[in-house]
Image: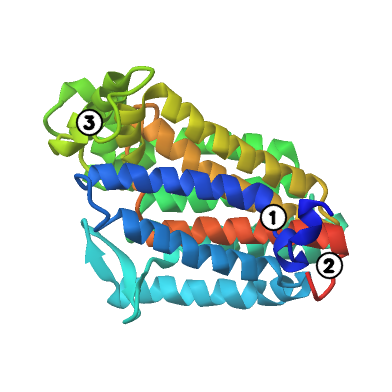
Amino acid sequence: MTLRSRIPEAIAREPWHVIVPLFALNTFGSAVLYSAAGGKLSPWALLHEIHFAVFLVMALVISRLPRELFQLLAYPGYGLLIVMLVLVELIGGIGGGSQRWLDLGFMTLQPSELMKPGIVLVLARFFETLPPSMTRSWRTLLPLGGLVAVPAGLVMLQPDLGTGLAICAGAAVVIFLAGLPTSWFVGAGAAGAAIAPVAFFTLLHDYQRKRVLTFLDPESDPLGTGYHITQSKIAIGSGGFFGKGFGNGSQSHLEYLPEAHTDFAFATMAEEWGMLGGLFVIAIFMWVLRWGLQVARNAPDRFSMLLAAGMTFTIFFYMAINMMMVMGLAPVVGIPLPWISHGGSSMMTNMICVGTIMAVERWSRRGGSLAG
């Protein structure tokens, strides 16, 4: 009798090829947060593990939902998120100069985070129901633009430029894969480049403009607007190849590195674990992203393909922007590193993406039946 035959079927059929790597990455993230807290489980490391356990259960529940339920909830879910974004503007909690959270009593929720997978779901549903002849018609642009512009605009009003751009980026990937003409994207890129200077001086807030200027020349104000990225580079560079050792990161322990447990958790990790730690993190992400793309490629229909591909890109956007930010390759924005940085809302968003990709994988194996 083989080992697999001794394992109950309900356990054996779970997607362990994804759960195990994510568990390893999240545990590594908890070790980073444990060190950032000065060798204490609270307030971040233990909560990080609890978040992962709770949202892993949520992801497994999502993975068993039938395709028809996703299709049914696409537009109502989108509408509910729009209402929540409006409520954020009216009664939302303020923190760090931004109004982004809703106090639900038992938890504090950031609706803009949920809109990242939400926009992917609603666009996948939109293109599934769109007649093929309309895909390349300019008449498609009006409803499509409305679906993207409304939530992106509400998020940018908070103001949260990073999340707004993430919503637009996820939408752009789904739209591109749906088959819209490439010339439209070239034209949109050219138009964006043309209006960027005007938007920079008229639409961005002062602190957002400073972030862009700091990205271009962080050494111009190393103790002011360039402080975050300067300290992050110092932390990463001082780690070398093998790192200073677990618990020996001076930048985070001496509080030189701001937001060492959230936005700059990768820099905290790199100082103590070095390039080897960074390669481990990147390898796990590449494994997860490769899995997501394979699921999208093998999806049984257009809706499932767009859904899996969009969710995979959402995870990629988190990873890429955060890593580029901490290394000075992108302006500083409030986007945490999945499964490494502390944060319940971002953990929930990424586990929703994982659960949805799991669901598509199950549909591919079982033909999208009610059982999954």
Where is residue 270? Give x, y as percent: 35, 29
Mark 3 residue crowding within 10 angstroms, few (<14) / some (14–19) / many (20+):
some
| SS class, disc 1 | loop
Where is residue 174? Give x, y as percent: 67, 50
Please say if the residues under marks 3 and 1 sit with CB atoms less than 8 Å apart. no
Say which quadrant the C terminus sits in: bottom right
| Residue at figure coordinates x 51%, y 53% from the top left | 167
Residue 326 in the figure: left or right of residue 18: left
The residues bearing labels 3 and 1 have C-alpha atoms spaced at a distance of 36 Å
Please say if the residues under marks 3 and 2 sit with CB atoms less than 8 Å apart. no
Q: Which badge, 3 or 1, comes first in the chain's sequence?
A: 1
Q: Is residue 179 above or below residue 371?
A: above
How many badges with numbers are in the image? 3
Along the line of sight, the residue nearer the viewer: 7 or 363:
7
| SS class, disc 3 | loop
The residue indicated by pointer 2 is 368
Where is residue 8? Give x, y as percent: 74, 66
Indicate which label's residue lies in the foreground, 1 or 2.
Answer: 1
Q: Is residue 172 above or below residue 142?
A: above
**The disc labelled 1 sits on which kind of residue?**
Pro
The residues bearing labels 3 and 2 have C-alpha atoms spaced at a distance of 50 Å
Q: Which badge, 1 or 2, comes first in the chain's sequence?
A: 1
Q: Is residue 186 above or below residue 350?
A: above
The residue indicated by pointer 1 is 15
The residues bearing labels 1 and 2 have C-alpha atoms spaced at a distance of 17 Å
Question: Which label belongs to residue 248?
Answer: 3
| Residue at figure coordinates x 50%, y 72% from the top left | 81
Where is residue 296? Give x, y as percent: 75, 48
**The disc labelled 2 sits on which kind of residue?**
Gly
**The disc labelled 3 sits on which kind of residue?**
Asn
